[in-house]
Image (cartoon, helix red, strand yellow):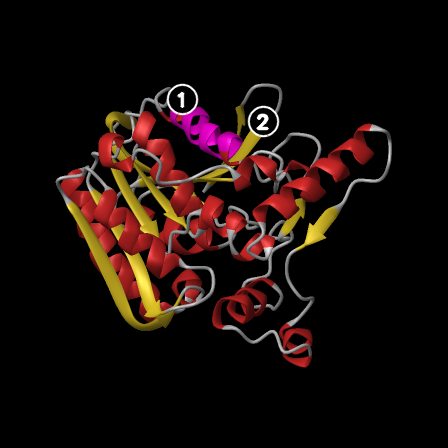
Amino acid sequence: MQTVMINHLYWDIAANIYFPPGFDNQKTYPAIISAHPIGSCKEQTSGNVYGEALAKEGFVVIAFDASFQGESGGEPRYIEDPTLRVEDFRVVTDYLVTLPYVDENRIGVLGICGGGGYAINAAMTERRIKVVGTVTGANYGRLMREGFSNYDPIAALEAMAQQRTAEARGEAVRVDDLLPASPEEAKQNGLTETDLFGATEYYRSPRGRAPNGVNRSLFSHQAVAVGWDAFHLAEVLLTQPLMVVVGDKVGAFGAYRDGCEVIGRAASKKKELVVVEGWSHYDLYDKPEPVSQALAKLVPFYKENL
């Protein structure tokens, strides 16, 4: 594995590159951009699970930290802006096409959770991305208009506007911690819904904890997400081969619903919805059995289309 810094507008994106066995930099390889979930980082599921597994199958995989998050630059910290998240894909693609060992005509993308929604949206207008795969992909804009704003997006926008004005006048920034501190605390507070508890169990325990997987969000900069839709114009612009992997244990974050929606809407002639039975959103992050089922479909999909 190699860690690199990729220049963005006025900051750098941090990324880990995973190489196939017997890698030879005199040869060319297909490449996959692996995008982490909301509040996650490249050292979690996008890199250490799917990145490593796809590299073992012959792909160069680059897992990157979103701008303003993880080891990537950008101030203020913890911005979750879909427009900037999508631009990250273009910048990473710019970097890949400069590498002599990457075949510029064989670049695909894999997005997990919110990274899946971003990957789909990026591929619509970034035509250097030839293949799209998602694992329990979610439309972050829909989440912001629904559960993440208590189903009152206008009130949320008003609060964001007030907070941004306060910060512009020098008051303290508001950074929201999106999860309970531990699975035990979640249980004590009755926060046992499948996806919310699954997220806590993954991010707030040794199972998935990583220094940069902090699940924090700068509240004053969330307004763009409320008005954003990952699948806008999918009927016209999403034409690449598409594979969407979801679990059938449905939770509040809505990946199953989003997966069904984008498969129905995509203009892609080759598209497949893969339902991993008996497993939930966060099971697909790292648990060996559901991950192996996902990879059993994704690996041949990428090999055939890249």
Q: Nearer the viewer, residue 77 or 11?
A: 77
On screen, residue 197 versus residue 51, left or right, reads right
Quarter of the view holding residue 18? top left
Residue 25 visible in the snapshot: no
Per the image, the residue denoted by label 1 is 94
Amino acid type of the residue tagged 2 in the rendering: Asp
Residue at 45% from the left image edge and 25% from the top image edge: 91
Question: Where residue 143 sits: x, y (%)?
Answer: 49, 52
Residue at 18% from the left image edge and 48% from the top image edge: 301
Q: Which mark is residue 12?
A: 2
Q: Does 72 appear above or below 213?
A: above
Secondary structure of the residue carrying tag 1 is helix
Other-residue count near label 1 (Cα within 10 Å), few / some / many at <14 / 14–19 / ≥20 = some
Residue 257 visible in the snapshot: yes
Question: Where residue 210 sits: x, y (%)?
Answer: 60, 56
Q: Earlier in the sequence, mark 2 or mark 1?
A: 2
Q: Which residues are magenta?
A: 83-94
Question: Where residue 261 sits: x, y (%)?
Answer: 29, 51
Other-residue count near label 2 (Cα within 10 Å), few / some / many at <14 / 14–19 / ≥20 = many
Q: Nearer the viewer, residue 127 or 212?
A: 127
Amino acid type of the residue tagged 1 in the rendering: Asp
Residue at 46% from the left image edge and 60% from the top image edge: 253
Q: Quadrant of the C terminus?
A: top left
Dominant SS type (magenta): helix
Q: Does 241 appear above or below 138?
A: above
Q: Does 178 appear above or below 181?
A: above
On screen, residue 304 versus residue 52, left or right, reads left
Label 2, label 1: how far apart the Cα atoms are: 13 Å
